Image (cartoon, grey):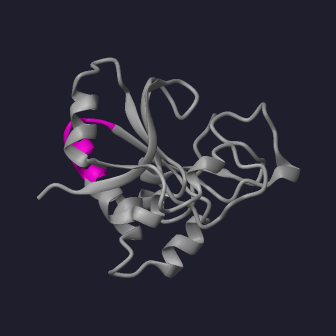
Amino acid sequence: MNTTIRIAGIINESIVDGPGIRLVVFAQGCPHRCQGCHNPQTHPFEGGQLVTIDDILEMVKKNPLLDGVTFSGGEPFSQAKPFARLGQRLKELGMNIMTYTGYTYEYLLKENNNSNGWKELLDVSDILVDGRFEIEKKNLLLPFRGSENQRIIDMNKTREQQRIVLLPL
């Protein structure tokens, strides 16, 4: 069964959207609509284009330089189930998964249910950047995030230690 994802676009090689060289998939649609958002074109849920998981996997397979794949947005958790399926398939290829969200990790855990797929997307994520972009806390010197309130969570250590562990940068 192949699944489609509504995306705003894909960057084939990025060094600013996570550690190493990464393919970046930008989800189309975002409920947060943060003031000063870097990607306001991703806000409408009806925009973008539909692509299949297989299409994205083929892009990844064609680039041996990739260290991982980043799910950005828009809001990947608005399409959590197909992004989780893509993440599972990417894990089979040995890819590291980094996911951006405007939600906090605590909110995602609390509001997770069987129909939204949030836990499945959290489970395939190695790194999670959480929290809304806050323009008054904008800091261009921060690696991999736009505002000081956003956290970079090491999801593997967080699962292992049953507490939030930030990625040391």
In the figure, 114 relative to 139: above or below? Answer: below
What residue is at 48 percent from the left and 65 percent from the top? 162
Picture coordinates of residue 81, whole percent (x, y):
32, 65
> Which of 30/47 is in front?
47
Horizontal side of residue 146 vs 112, given as left or right: right
Note whether residue 159 is visible: yes
Residue 37: x and y in percent read 71, 49
Q: Overall secondary structure of the magenta stretch?
A: helix
Residue 102 to residue 53: above or below: below
Q: Is residue 87 magenta?
A: yes
> In this orientation, which residue lies closer to the viewer: 159 or 90?
90
The answer to whether 6 appears left or right of 43 in the picture is left
Q: How many marks?
A: 0
Q: Residue at x 39, y 69 (%)?
A: 119
Place residue 97 in its image quadrant: top left
| Quadrant in which the C terminus is drawn | top right
Query: Do we see residue 125 in this rendering?
Result: no
Extreme residue in the right direction: 136
Identify the image quadrant of residue 34.
bottom right
Q: Nearer the viewer, residue 43 or 85?
A: 43
- Horizontal side of 40 relative to 10 (left or right) equals right
Q: Position of residue 116 (x, y in %)?
A: 39, 75
For this rendering, which residue is in front, 168 or 53? 53
Residue at 41 percent across and 69 percent down: it is 118
State the residue at coordinates (55%, 34%): 17
Of the 4 image quadrants, the one containing the N terminus is: bottom left
Q: For the view shown, which residue lies furthest in the left direction?
A: 1
Report the span colored magenta: 86-95
Tell whether position 66 is magenta. Answer: no
* Residue 11 image point, x, y percent: 45, 30
